Amino acid sequence: METTTFWAKTTNDKEKYPNAFHPLICHLIDVAMAAKLLWQKVLPEKTKERLAKVFELENDLKLEKAGNLIAFLIGLHDLGKCSPPFALRGRNDNQNNQTFRLLELYQDTEYFCDGFKTASEAPHNFVTSVVLPPILEEKFQFKTLLAKNISDIIGGHHGTFPDSNFLTKKTGDDYCGNQVWRDAQKELVETLAGLFEIEGDFSHLPNQKLDNATAMIFAGLTTTADWIGSNADFFKCEIEDSTKNFSLDVNEYPKKSKTQAAEALEKLG
């Protein structure tokens, strides 16, 4: 099963497209693109320097590396949607609900399972805060405290940050998925990293949290980028019918996403 099969959103036009969905990887790209354009066109230079300093990239020419890195991290805000409570939520929904029909994406695959929490018990944004830190540590050598802090910041994109009870006690397979799901989460991160040319070892960064002001700027940028990237007027479902064979070229999609993000930013102001 390819990671393009994981879904992030359904359509508002359910009568015309009852089986449409927007792949999770596409939504991660959309929000990352929105963040990148906000970085390039909206954020004041001093604000960008402040955020870049977190990653010791404030002296980078035009702050492009910092912009790419921050856009990538913000794009990961919905990584928690790659988990049973969200992806398989149709098992707890009415059979007329679109999410119930999306279960067909997972049936007869190793991802189909029982015994997981409901989507309300395991909010996807909080799941992001749980599953992302070890990936940032393993793949990019972020130190533990910084990895957790960044994950908590982007996990708060719906206006509420995860509490310590969730982060320390609700980390099991019933919340976040078993190893099969964890591997898919890693693959999504690696795919987005490749598209945004994120390379390198960040082990040189200090093992400390962002100061409160910088954290709030980062959180605000994440929320704004998600608001733009979630606007269905500009980012329509890439897959119109989940019941038919479909394909998606992940390497080509960023071009389309960038165009849509630019249009959205221009019209939304």
Image: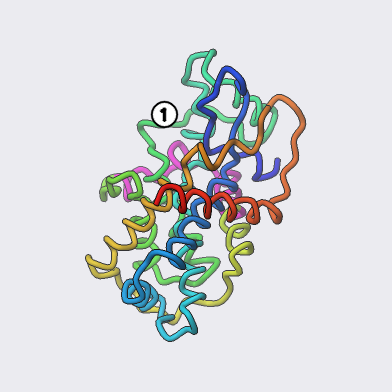
The kind of residue on which mark 1 rests is Thr
Rendered residue at 37%/62% (across/down): 150
The one nearer the camera, 156 or 44, is: 44
Q: Secondary structure at mark 1?
A: loop
Taking the image as shown, residue 173 lies to the left or right of residue 108, namely left
For disc 1, the marked residue is: 118
User: In the image, residue 239 lies at what x, y percent?
Assistant: 66, 35
Of 149 and 45, which appears nearest the observer? 45
Left or right: residue 183 versus residue 141 is: right
User: Along the line of sight, which residue is nearer the eye, 75 or 233?
Assistant: 233
Residue at figure coordinates x 32%, y 57% from the top left: 219
Kindly report the secondary structure that dominates the magenta region of the rendered protein. helix
Name the image quarter holding residue 106: top right
Q: Is residue 174 magenta?
A: yes
The magenta-colored residue range is 166-187
Q: Residue 101 at what x, y percent from top left? A: 60, 21
In the rendered image, residue 113, in percent from the top left (x then y), is placed at 57, 30
Q: Residue at x 48, y 28 (%)?
A: 115
Q: Where is 153 relative to 11, above or below? A: below
